[in-house]
Image (cartoon, helix red, strand yellow):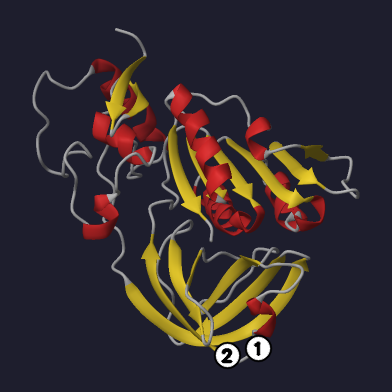
Amino acid sequence: MGARCSLVVNGRSVRVSTGDTPLEAALAEGMIAPLQAQSGNLLAGQGIAQGSAAPSGRRHPARRARAEALRPALPGAPIQGQEEAPPPPVAVRKGTVTEIRRLSPGILEIVATLTRRPTGEPGHQALVTFAGLPTRTLSPTLRVDGTTEINDVVFHVARDPEGDPLDGLRLDQPVRLKGPVGRGQYRPGGGRLVLVAAGAGFGAIWAIARAARYVEPAREMALAVGARDALDLYMRESLDWLRRTGVGRIVLCADRGRQRPPDVRSGPLSAHLPSLRATDVVHVAGDHSTVGAVQVLAAAVGARCYPIVID
């Protein structure tokens, strides 16, 4: 039997690694709706509840060996193919805007102080409504220097440099959060962590990367970060911190920009990813085209991919 096989889900071809169920592969690649995130119920094929016995003699040897190899590295951590912790319940939080800072021509850092601590894991999203503005789907993150307060929530938000409704945002403006939503959250355990961020999508990836360096400091990590314009690569302070903690593979790229620094490569993010492996865990955050391109590359090698689409 080969290492991977082909499967057609909803008319689209999916590459499935040996030992993974078809449903797991389809969910990870976004081929079908993530019902687990909506209902909190365990889907068939997502794993066996703790305390129940696995059917004797039916578990694939490769899958059993992979689980046994990973378990000692981080006891109690969720392993790919096994049951995940149920998602946190959706909650509503209210507060006010307390900080507004322009990080680059196209990115704002907005901090809101809430009356109660926000819920969710790094990489989760929330439905955010600033009073008088349409609701946006944003990813709570940290300031670029990695700091935050217990009741604060930080957002990196894309804006139109030629004029944006966010330019009218003011301090003390009411804000409402509903979440968490999405399934792109950080999951400890597994293979190499490949993190891909486009533009303001770095907010979600920064939250995941920083958490992973504390929870799994020995886990291999690679980052690819891009922007349409080199001037919007606002995250150098964050990347410097990651380098100091031992992350050696960090690539910056930009589609355009006359003032492109020497360490910024030219072209789209998908052209500058590391060679993906079937054992990789990929988180990608950004616009639809970037997320879609990375999903295709991950699917081609059978890597698990968790997309985070940014408005």
Find disc 2 in the rendering and name its residue.
173
Residue 95 shows in the view:
yes
Q: In the image, which disc is placed on residue 309?
A: none
Q: Is residue 80 left or right of residue 36?
A: right
Alpha carbons under labels 2 and 1: distance apart: 6 Å
Viewer-nearest residue: 274 or 167 = 167
Q: Residue furthest top?
A: 1
Secondary structure beneath disc 2? loop
Q: Residue at x 89, y 40 (%)?
A: 262
Query: Which residue is found at the position 51% from the left and 63% from the top?
Result: 139
Residue 170 numbered tag:
1
Q: Is residue 84 above or below residue 86?
A: above
The amino acid marked with disc number 1 is Arg
Q: Residue 196, how many percent across, how many down?
A: 59, 43
Q: Is residue 77 left or right of residue 211?
A: left
Pick out the residue farthest to the bottom. 172
The x, y position of residue 273, in whole percent, is 63, 32
**Residue drawn at point x = 63 percent, y = 75 percent:** 110
x and y percentages locating residue 2 in the rendered image: 34, 9
Query: How many labels, in total?
Result: 2
Q: Quadrant of the N terminus?
A: top left
Q: Is residue 5 left or right of residue 155?
A: left
Label 2 close to label 1 by CB (< 8 Å): yes
- Between 10 and 105, the residue placed more toward the observer is 10
Q: Amino acid at mark 2?
A: Gln
Circle 2: is it few (<14), some (14-19), or many (20+) Cα within 10 Å? some
